[in-house]
Structure formats: C-alpha cells, structure tokens
Image (spheres, grey):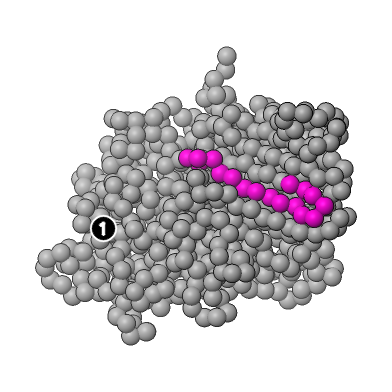
Amino acid sequence: MTSRRTFLRATLSSTLAASLGSLPPTIARALDIPAHTRTGTIKDVEHVVILMQENRSFDHYFGTMNGVQGFGDRFVIPAPATPAHQNRTVFAQQREDDPTRLIAPFALNTTQDFRLIRLEGTPHSFKDAQAAWDEGRLSQWPKSKHNHAMAHFERADLPFQYALAEAFTLCDAYFCAMHSGTNPNRVVHWTGTNVGPNGPVIANDYDELHADPKGHGGYDWTTYPERLSAAGIDWRLYQNMKDNFTDNPLVGFKTYRAADKATSGKLADLAERSIRTRDLDKLKEDVLAGKLPQVSWIIGTAEGSEHPSTSSPAQGADYTAKVLEALTANPKVWAKTVLLINFDENDGYFDHVPPPAPPSLDANGQPLGYAEGAEREYHQGDDALKNRPYGLGPRVPMYVISPWSKGGYVASEVFDHTSVIRFLETRFGVHEPNISPWRRAVCGDLTSCFDFKTPNDQPFFAHLPKTADRAEQARRLSGKTTPKTPDALTAPVQEQGLRPRRATPYRFETGVEVSTIHVKVIFFVDPDAKAAVFHVYDRLKPEAAPYRYTVKDNEGKAEYTLTGTGGQSFDLFILGPNGFHQRLTGAFADLPAVFGLGVLPKGAYYGLDETGRASFDYRLTDNAYGGVAQDLHLHSDPINAAHTFGIDTTKTHGWFDISVQFGGVTIRCAGHVEDGKPSLSDPAAFGAARLTI
C-alpha cells in the first residue's frame, strides 16, 4: 500500500522536477545539512533569525505561482456593481483615470523591459490603505493606490524568490499587521501592538532616533526584545545604523532613546544590542564563531530592502542570498537555525484576499461573534475612520527557511506579524501580553509550517540562482519606472500544478435555514480548532460592506440572518479560511428546509432536513472535480428528519466543491478536509483569473 509520504514524494517529484539545477555551494550545503533532531520538537531550534523586507503584496509576487491561493482562486469576492459592470469580481477594478473602464492585475514582464524591476511605489498611508480595503470590499484599489498598484511579477521576473519558495515553505495566508505603512507594521512586529502610551502608531513619524514631531518623547510601552532580556534570552539586531532605511522601529521608544545616551549598565547593553551598527559581516563572524544569539533581527540596507523605487526584487534577492550565505557558513549552527523572511506591508500593491478583521459591529456597537480584547483593535481617532479595524492588513510574502521546513510546501494557516512573536513565545517561553486575545485566536504561531519529527525525510527539488549579476543590472538603472496601464482588460493566469501543503488547524460546521421570511446562516468552530473569520457578502446589495464574524471554539456560535418575503430573491457569498466557501442563491421558500455542512478530520458531510415533508427531491452537483451530477429523492423519517451524507474527497487530496439544489434554492459548498497530515494543493485552482462572478 502506498503511504501518504510516498505519494507526496512522487507527486512532488513530478510537479517540481522542472526546478532542478545546480546550486550555489553554500545553499547546496545548507540543504544537505540534516536538521538537529535531539528531541523531535521545536526545542531542537536554538536560533531564530528574522529578516523583515519591504513593501510587497502576495499577489504582486506570487499570484501566478502554482499551488497557492493566487490568481486562479476559484472564489473571488464580488465587487460593487457599476452601471456598465454588474457582475465583476475584485480582480476587475475601476481605473483611476477612467472609472468606466476596468483594469485587472497585469504582468510587468521584466524579461522584455528590465527597467520595470525598479517599479515605482504607491501610496501606503493609514488613510489610503483603509480606502483600498473599503471595509472588506477591496473595490477602491486604483482610485486609492494608482493603476500600477495592479502590476505583478511572474516566475521569470523573480527567479530567486520562486526558487526560495520551492526549496522551503511559503505562507499564502500571512497578512501584515495593519492597513498602514512601514513603521506601524514594524512596531507591531517588535511589540505585538500599535496601541499604547503616546500611540497609536499609524504613521512613520517616529522612525528616527531623535525625531519627536509630537513632543511626547517617544512611545512608552514594553517591546519584545526587552522581555527577552528580562528572561535571560540572548538577542541582537544586525544592521547598519547609517543605512537601515529608517526600518528600526525601536528608535521610536523612550527606553531606547534613553539607552542611546547611557554609558554603562542595562541601558547601555540595550543600546549595544538594538541601536548600534553590526552588519552582515559581523553576522557571519558570529555564525562561524558559534556565537549567533538565540534571537536575531536583521534590518536590511536601503538597497537590499526590496522596497519599490529605492530597491528592487533583484537587489533584495542578492541581500537575502548574503544572509543565507552568512547563516550557512557554519553547518553546525545552520542545523539548529530557523530563518523567517517576511515583508512589513504591501506598499499599495493589490491583493485579492479579504484580510481577516475583528468582527463587524451591530447597530448597538456590539461585535458579531468572538471579540475578546478586540477593543484595542478598532481605531478611536478621527471620526472618518473611527471604529475601523487596524488590521489585519493585506497578504504579504513569508518564507519559512530552515532544515525543518524544506520541500516546497505551502502553508495556509492564517498568520500575521504577531505570529513571529508567537513562534518565539512557543520556543523560548517568553509571553507577550501586548498581543490581543482576538489576534491570538485568529492568527497562528507558525509551528504548522515545520516538520520537527521527521525533517530529514523531505524531498527537495529547487534551483537557487545566483543573484549578483541581476542585482548589479538593477543597480545601474537610472531610476524608478511607472509601467504603462494596459489598454485591454486581460485576466492574469496562474500556473497549473500541485504543491505539497502543510496541515492547517481548521474544523468547522455551518447550518443554513431557508424559510418564507428569512435565510439564516450559523457558523460553528469545533472545540480545540483554530478560530475562524467568515465574511458574508450580500450580492443583491453590492454596495454594502460584508459582515465579518469571528467564531472561536467553546465561545458559542455566530449567526447571520437575512429577512425577506415569500418569492423574494437572495444571493449570499461567504468566505472563510482554508479555501472555505458557501454561496446561497434562490428565493425565500414556500416549503422550508434546513441544510448543514461539516468540515471535520474524519471527512466532509452535508445534511438535509425535510422539516415535516413526506419526501424531498434535490440535485447534487460536483462543480470542479469531475463527479457525476445526481438527482436524489429522500423519504421522511418519522424518528429523525435529518439525512446526512458524506462527501468523497479521497481522489481530490481533501478538496470538495458541491452544489445542492432543491426547489429554487442552490447551496454551493467548497473547502478542504484537514486530518492533521500534509496534503496537496487544490488541483482545480489554476488558469485565468475570474473577472466575473
């Protein structure tokens, strides 16, 4: 009998074999070095290194990569209708210069015009980021960010980035912390929050050591590095203080400003670790000497930052390669090291996935669903944006690079910048109280990205190309370039092919009740499963913001109700994590019915309750995986009216997409069954982006 691991190996071999090639010696050696496996747990990790790069969205970099939630996503949220465009998705945005015309994500194609590698940046302040998010409608992107915010790269443009993802693990549900720019997101990354004394942080006005534009002397709450010091955990920042692109957020805090003036004691030690120059040469020296701290943050140079205009993907790749070269200089150290590479924010570049956000507030100001500690997640400043959630912000790339995360996996659990702190908490036991309970419930701790038990039994096929020549070519460019807006509306295309997939912790059930006067949707999350955020869009009110529900285990249920009258139509579009989707269409029924869906470790099921009728006819359709449509007939059961049926996912790697039609009502359900083991990506998620619903 073929084991799951053998099957994954065989599938990976066939889908990623095209990536084979010669490796730079240091990287090849790193991939050959077996992981340190003394305990087979996270305790085998002795060093965590964190490199935060600048200003790229996930779709902007990886929308065309096979096996991720990219442009081939089959469940794209609806965009508000316009007189000329009634059924568009958010992939079809109104142009900034002419709202009667549409623009879709368009490829830059740097192989034809290499100048586009140094792409012009876009607006990325709190105000315009909130406008682009549009309370979950995602419908104001070019208007808020300019047309070229829809530009994206492809595999040929990003050879190093794609190779890195296919060597290790790429997260496709990692979101920046908030809808804003660099410093607010970096403050969350280093402290767990943007709210505290002399906050909130929503702009870059305290990103230099001696700047004090508001006259309060700096932010005044405890940072995570300080907590590590108090716990006796060794840590350090590697940076060039004269060339760090003002990307060190610690300089905006009172404690570090006082440390800058100290000559001895704890404050002087704090300054030495955090606001003094110690560059990549020193990083390599520490690795070779076996003195790499337990926790290290790296802040890149302006040229190496990957920031639009100032830097480029080519120069960022070269900087990242130098970090990898330094860390792999000592195989004994690399065998015990995790390198996390994320991006602080998306700049203004488009991403199509609505970020999980704290619950919507009802008419009485009460949250819909679980919201413990979420009061700090809503902005309480200017009236125009009052009660807007700070985040989560748009998706950004995250690479998980280590001997425990090889194999070209995609990880689809929801993460954000606080997840990096959570990983450090899990490994070193130092708690960060600034992270709200709501974020802890919704965002994971990154441990699902790793295989600590059998890390050395992983296939590997990838070519990490040399970076210096492309970086030098980008360096010689005279300046940034704004791409021409395409005349035609053309859908971007995602590559076909499977990718190995890390297990995710999602298990939930939904119930739907259709009657003559309402449609009711109830969301449940199983005990011990991860909390989930659901978005509910009313397609017949496309101008309305979606309702957001957070559902947590043992915290009850969340319920959405749409009222109407007999014969009135409804069309509800629902999204959840891990590929979950429901769409409910039809009319308020003369004969009521109850429908249930479960996505559980033992499999997926759907249930029907004919609610007192002698019989019940319905049609079952497989929408994506080749199943034959079936017309079915149920007879009343006097003891139990509910009928439950399993959904076969054995041939689809756990994926399903079915529709159940009865009378004039259609309920579509899609998602992925999680059994705690690795699987494969959705075989139906590829091809041209869906520009219409």
Task: Judge whether residue 320 is colored magenta.
Answer: no
Q: Is residue 647 above or below residue 671?
A: above
- Judge by depth and name the residue closer to the eye, 604 or 336: 604
Residue name at image x 34 percent, y 45 percent: 426
Where residue 208 appears, x then y in whole percent?
34, 75
Mark 1 crowd level (few <14, some 14–19, many ≥20, 10 Å Cα): some
Quadrant position of the N terminus in the picture: top right
Q: Start and end of the magenta stretch?
A: 513-530
Query: Is 196 situated left or right of 567 in this image?
Result: left
Residue name at image x 36 percent, y 71 percent: 196
- Judge by depth and name the residue closer to the eye, 91 or 240: 91
Where residue 618 appears, x then y in whole percent?
84, 36
What residue type is disc 1 on? Answer: Arg
| Observer able to see residue 327 | no
Residue name at image x 52 percent, y 37 percent: 503
Q: Give the farthest residue toward the top.
A: 1
Q: Is residue 105 above or below residue 553?
A: below
Where residue 687 appears, x then y in whole percent?
72, 45
Quarter of the image where one finds residue 626: top right
Q: Give the farthest residue toward the left.
A: 264
Q: Is residue 114 above or below residue 453?
A: below
User: Which residue, given by chain and number where applicable, does mark 1 sit on?
Assistant: 227
Q: Is residue 491 above or below residue 614?
A: below
Where residue 88 appears, x then y in whole percent?
78, 60
Assign a secondary structure to mark 1: helix
| Observer able to see residue 543 | yes
Residue name at image x 49 percent, y 35 percent: 407
Quarter of the image where one finds residue 229: bottom left
Quadrant position of the C terminus in the picture: bottom right
